[in-house]
């Protein structure tokens, strides 16, 4: 309890108490909505109100037996995985290149590569809508995968780039001096070391695509609707408890992603700790 | 080269090595660039190109020129002071006949209707009633008889101003401005002048959400930065879980919580605080609450990392020098968090400016932000020029703020490096 030891005066103690109270309220504000929606998906009634009339799995049943919802889940997976693979290839190559490239234009190139994160979704979506419609890429999986890759790649560049920054280039030199070809050195020395960074990048990329809805809203035909897109129309038209079941499924995916990422981070810290 | 020759005179063995090193370095740089190139090309096709295309649409104005080519050509030499000459009328009559047959007249009518309300009727009624090409010399009379609007100067200046190939019309419209008959820039008529209001609303909502995020985020970031790592890592989950939860899930959750029979209203009713359910959603309040919830982690995380970098020794030093806690906080701690406050606030503000999904789902008609109108004009009314112009203004604001953000974060890295 190093913090309470430094709290000497009563006013400091009051300030600390206020901090804790306010923070607790903010934590409740952050987490309560997500927790509040979950039990509703197990309700046996069709209204989204508490108290629940009874427990049932009927809304999950509804979700699984609805071709619309299942199709949207399938689409989210297809588009998410495909754009993750594509953005990993493009992003990792770019991060490797940027780590070695020395030029006064580098900040400019980096800003360009990262700009899809900052530009409002609607602007990207409208631009893509105009650009892809004449070449038949609206209403197609390919168009959505390309668009999501553009949005997801910056996260890969950032995550992999950060890993490379902490990577000791002497190891690559040592591999080369011991006679490894560049490809061998990459596969046997560099890759195992940057693998956690790559995995984090892939998780970020997948999460970006999995959660994206604005571009899908503009570009997807009825065949390519993703899970968030289906939720969007669900919320607009009529909120049935099936949406809460979808929300629980989406949140479960988020929790798995977050837990994996946290595990990777811990592993990385442990490795750093043991080497230092 | 001269360099190499000069040094080569007295150190002949060094030159090849130097040159070889330089060449090796150059190859390395070319290889590095080659690795970045695929992404750059990809982004050119899927990001920069589309956005450049959108910006081009904000000034592109070729619809009228394509549908009524002779008229636009005839009006090029018109001084605009009086009605145009007979040749222009004859050109219009001929253009209308051709455009009606090819179907392009509807496109021109739509574009002209943006500039002058009712133009669509003028053009379609004229096209319907113009049975044949008028006898030479009677075009002015014939057209005037079909629709008296052709005897007015504004009808003709509208066609001339929409003659393209580029126009400032949409960009002016996005700022509630227009050109009058004489080409001077004036305020747009009140029924069309809604965008300054929308931009103002977007700005105010973003500012309010940023302020809320700062007020709520500061104590949390302080707590997380002060607690020992074990406990702060645990509490960090409360920040990261919402951060990773789908935007749609969080928006949906707020609807469930705030609706008239929702959890919040029910609890307040049960506690006896209210009799009638409060209107908490589909209004400005709902938008601000939901957006604050979504954007709060973007404030807490930069604040947290800037506070984490502040050494507790500074505060101890201030205390040992006799500063009361509040003074030490205000004069020692707070100034050091300013870069974090700046970065977090700018980030939240930038993200809030472009928000679309949350206001669209939890806002009322009067709470829609600029992105909503861009989407509306793109997919519903297909007024692509105006959608692009509004997008251009939003993009410009975002880029300017992002540049400031970049400078701020860069500066932070520099000072951070100096401190260590």
Image (spheres, coloured by chain):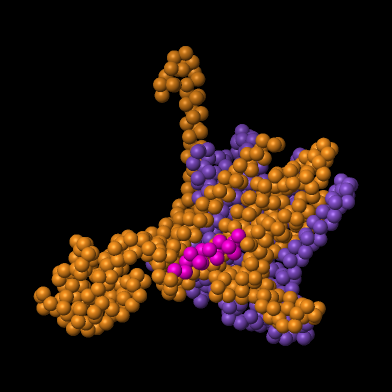
Chain colours: A purple, B orange
Q: Is residue A201 above or below residue B10?
A: below
**Residue A178 included in the magenta stretch of the image:** no
Q: Position of residue B300 (x, y in %)?
A: 70, 55
Quarter of the image where the N terminus of chain B is located: top left
- In the image, B177 versus A148, the foreground residue is B177
In the picture as drawn, the residue positioned furthest to the top comes out as B10
Task: Look at the image and give the residue range highlighted in magenta.
Answer: B193-207
- Is residue B319 at least partly visible in the picture? yes
Residue B317 screen position, x and y as percent: 81, 38
Instruction: Look at 49% across and 62% down and name the residue there.
Output: A123
Q: Report if residue B205 lies within the magenta region.
A: yes
> Residue A245, position in %: x, y?
68, 77
* Residue B104 drawn above or below residue A116: below
Residue B248 located left or right of residue B334? left
> In terms of secondary structure, what is the magenta stretch mainly?
helix
- Which residue is at a point 44% across and 69% down the rendered structure image? B193
Q: Please identify the residue farthest to the left as the structure is shown.
A: B136
- State the residue at coordinates (74%, 42%): B332
Looking at the image, which is closer to me, A174 or A247?
A: A247
Q: Which is nearer the eye, B164 or B280?
A: B280
Q: Name the side, left or right, on which B300 lies relative to B357.
A: right
Q: Nearer the viewer, residue B209 or B23?
A: B209
Asked if residue A78 can be seen in this view, the reply is no
- The number of callouts visible is 0
- Please report the residue visible at 69 percent of the width from the left and 68 percent of the height from the top: A251
The quadrant of the image that shows the C terminus of chain B is top right
The image shows residue A133 at horizontal and vertical percentages of 42, 68
């Amino acid at each position: 309890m190093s913090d309470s030891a430094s709290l000497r005066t009563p006013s400091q103690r009051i300030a600390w108490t206020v901090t804790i109270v306010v923070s607790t309220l903010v934590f409740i504000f952050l987490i309560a909505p997500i927790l509040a929606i979950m039990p509703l998906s197990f309700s046996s009634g069709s209204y989204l109100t508490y108290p629940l009339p009874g427990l049932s799995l009927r809304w999950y049943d509804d979700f699984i037996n609805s071709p619309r919802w299942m199709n949207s889940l399938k689409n989210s997976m297809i588009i998410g995985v495909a754009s993750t693979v594509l953005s990993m290839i493009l992003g990792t190559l770019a991060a490797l290149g940027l780590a070695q490239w020395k030029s006064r234009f580098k900040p400019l190139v980096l800003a360009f590569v990262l700009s899809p994160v900052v530009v409002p979704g609607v602007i990207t979506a409208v631009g893509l809508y105009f650009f892809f419609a004449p070449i038949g890429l609206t209403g197609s999986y390919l168009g959505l995968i390309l668009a999501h890759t553009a949005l997801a790649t910056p996260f890969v560049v950032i995550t992999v780039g950060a890993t490379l920054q902490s990577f000791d280039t002497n190891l690559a030199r040592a591999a080369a001096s011991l006679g490894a070809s560049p490809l061998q050195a990459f596969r046997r020395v560099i890759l195992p070391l940057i693998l956690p960074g790559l995995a984090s990048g892939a998780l970020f990329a997948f999460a970006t695509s999995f959660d994206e809805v604005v571009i899908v809203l503009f570009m997807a035909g009825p065949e390519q609707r993703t899970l968030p897109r289906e939720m969007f129309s669900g919320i607009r038209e009529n909120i049935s408890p099936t949406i809460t079941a979808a929300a629980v499924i989406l949140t479960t995916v988020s929790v798995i992603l977050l837990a994996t990422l946290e595990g990777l981070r811990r592993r990385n810290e442990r490795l750093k700790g043991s080497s230092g | 080269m001269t360099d190499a020759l000069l040094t080569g005179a007295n150190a002949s063995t060094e030159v090849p090595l130097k040159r070889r090193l330089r060449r090796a370095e150059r190859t390395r740089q070319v290889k590095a660039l080659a690795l970045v190139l695929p992404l750059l090309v990809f982004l050119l096709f899927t990001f920069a190109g589309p956005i450049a295309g959108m910006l081009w649409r904000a000034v592109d104005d070729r619809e009228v020129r394509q549908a009524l080519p002779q008229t636009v050509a005839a009006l090029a030499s018109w001084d605009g002071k009086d009605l145009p000459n007979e040749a222009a009328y004859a050109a219009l009559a001929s253009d209308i006949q051709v455009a009606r047959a090819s179907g392009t007249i509807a496109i021109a009518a739509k574009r002209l209707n943006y500039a002058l309300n009712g133009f669509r009727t003028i053009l379609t009624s004229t096209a319907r009633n113009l049975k044949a090409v008028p006898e030479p010399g009677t075009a002015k009379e014939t057209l005037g008889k079909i629709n008296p609007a052709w005897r007015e100067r504004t009808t003709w200046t509208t066609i001339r101003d929409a003659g393209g190939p580029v126009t400032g019309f949409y960009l002016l419209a996005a700022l509630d401005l227009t050109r009058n008959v004489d080409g001077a820039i004036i305020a747009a008529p009140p029924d069309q002048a809604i965008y300054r209001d929308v931009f103002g609303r977007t700005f105010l909502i973003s500012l309010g959400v940023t302020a809320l995020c700062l007020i709520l985020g500061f104590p949390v970031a302080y707590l997380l930065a002060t607690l020992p790592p074990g406990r702060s890592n645990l509490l960090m989950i409360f920040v990261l879980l919402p951060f990773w939860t789908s935007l749609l899930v969080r928006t949906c959750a707020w609807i469930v919580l705030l609706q008239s029979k929702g959890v919040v209203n029910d609890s307040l009713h049960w506690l006896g605080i209210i009799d009638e359910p409060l209107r908490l959603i589909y209004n400005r309040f709902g938008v601000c609450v939901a957006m604050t919830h979504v954007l709060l982690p973007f404030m807490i995380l930069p604040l947290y990392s800037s506070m984490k970098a502040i050494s507790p020794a500074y505060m101890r030093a201030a205390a040992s020098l006799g500063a009361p806690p509040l003074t030490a906080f205000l004069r020692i701690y707070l100034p050091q968090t300013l870069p974090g406050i700046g970065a977090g606030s700018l980030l939240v503000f930038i993200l809030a400016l472009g928000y679309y999904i949350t206001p669209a789902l939890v806002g009322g008609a009067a709470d829609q932000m600029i992105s909503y109108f861009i989407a509306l004009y793109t997919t519903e009314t297909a007024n692509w020029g105006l959608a692009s112009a509004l997008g251009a203004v939003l993009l410009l604001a975002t880029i300017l703020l992002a540049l400031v953000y970049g400078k701020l974060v860069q500066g932070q890295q520099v000072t951070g490096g100096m401190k260590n």
